[in-house]
Amino acid sequence: MTSRRPAVSIREFPVSDAEAGPYAIAAGPDGALWFTLVHAGRVGRLTPDGETTSYALASASGGPSVIAAGPDGALWFTEFRGHRIGRITTAGEVTSFALPTPDAGPFGIAVGPDDALWFTEAGADRIGRITTEGEVAEFPLAVAGAFPSGIAAGPDGRLWFTMNQANAIGAVTVDGEVTVHPLPTPGAGPVGITAGGDGALWFVEIGAGQIGRIAPDGKIDEFPLPDRASRPHAIVAAADTDGGCWFTEWGANRVGRITHDGRRHEIHEHELPTPSSEPHGIALGPDGSVWTALETGSLARLRAVEDAG
């Protein structure tokens, strides 16, 4: 269901040209926003006052995709086309690690409960683990052509991930034991996933235009969006006491929010100022604002009007 939309202010910060493709975003330990430039082979940094810097990777065609703050004070990211895992310090020093499996296609990445980085291998149907020293292990899935995509640490000590082409949500223990939960909706195409404040995992269904919720016991709920063709892409848990999650609608040029109290849910959507800006990744900033990466060359900040400055 929907109700009256709360007011937010939206400000866009240009960070690249339209060809570079800001894609994913994460809050760094230095109080800045870090983002990938998927088409330019660079990682960028935006300070709270709007200063932008970007750092070149070894290959301009590696396709840096998802980025996350690591347990070691650095940022870690996947190179989908380069088949590598990258690390960048807050001073801009870059290292990268090749994966054992050819054409692995790493995409999602998240910190696990063991202080290692866990990632999906979309091209190889595997889940990977890399320590902060660069030691890599891989765990095969029992499903061929699953295209594992987003990944997030759950409240139960497992890593939860979307299986975009298998239409399922998976969970893996730190020992590599995998469980698979098929989705009720055919062709849902789950992509982004996040740990919610309610003890469940929330995910987006890009193919079905829905937001999904899965409890650690495997119970699944799905919530259709008002525009089923909006192509939701990424999702992050909200920071405030109301809980819920923020998500991007890549195909509709909007950012949305869903709240759920166990009995009813509400969905609010916010149009982005620049037409066809292609919102992809989404993250919470150091001040609790919501940030999204716009593939056309900007980062957008959303703030509740009473907090806007």
Image (cartoon, grey):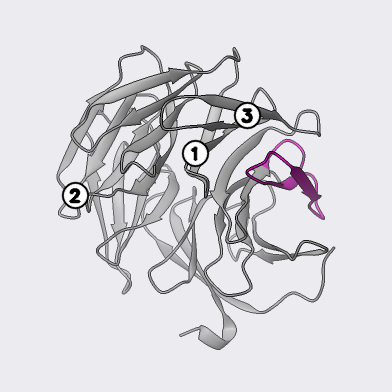
Left or right? Give the position of 111 relative to 289.
left
Q: Position of residue 284 (x, y in %)?
A: 46, 63
- The quarter of the displayed image where residue 102 is located: top left
Numbered label attached to residue 164: 3
- Point out residue 44 in the picture as x, y percentages from the top left corner: 30, 51
Q: Are marks 1 and 3 in contact (CB under 8 Å)?
A: no
**Magenta run includes residue 208:** yes
What's the amino acid at mark 2? Answer: Thr
- SS at mark 3 in the image: loop
Q: Looking at the image, which is closer to me, 288 or 272?
A: 288
Which mark is on residue 158?
1
The C terminus appears in which quarter of the rendering? Answer: bottom left
Mark 2 surroundings within 10 Å by alpha-carbon count, few (fewer than 14), some (14 through 19), many (20 or more): some
Q: Which residue is rendered at x = 36% and y = 52% of the image?
A: 16
Above-or-below relation of 160 to 52: above
Q: Residues within 10 Å of mark 1 (few under 14, many from 20)?
A: many
Q: Amino acid at mark 1?
A: Arg
First to last magenta residue range: 205-230
- The three-letter amino acid code for the residue at tag 3 is Asn
Q: Judge whether residue 278 can be spotted in this image.
A: no
The residue positioned 58% from the left and 56% from the top of the image is 196
In this picture, residue 134 sits left or right of residue 232: left
Q: State the CA–CA distance, disc 1 to disc 2.
A: 27 Å
Q: Earlier in the sequence, mark 1 or mark 2?
A: 2
Determine whether 259 is above or below 95 in the image: below
Mark 1 or mark 2, whichever is nearer to me: 1
**Label 3 neighbour load within 10 Å: few <14, some 14-19, many 20+:** many
Q: Pinpoint residue 123: horizontal percent, then vertical percent.
A: 48, 18
Element marked by disc 1: loop
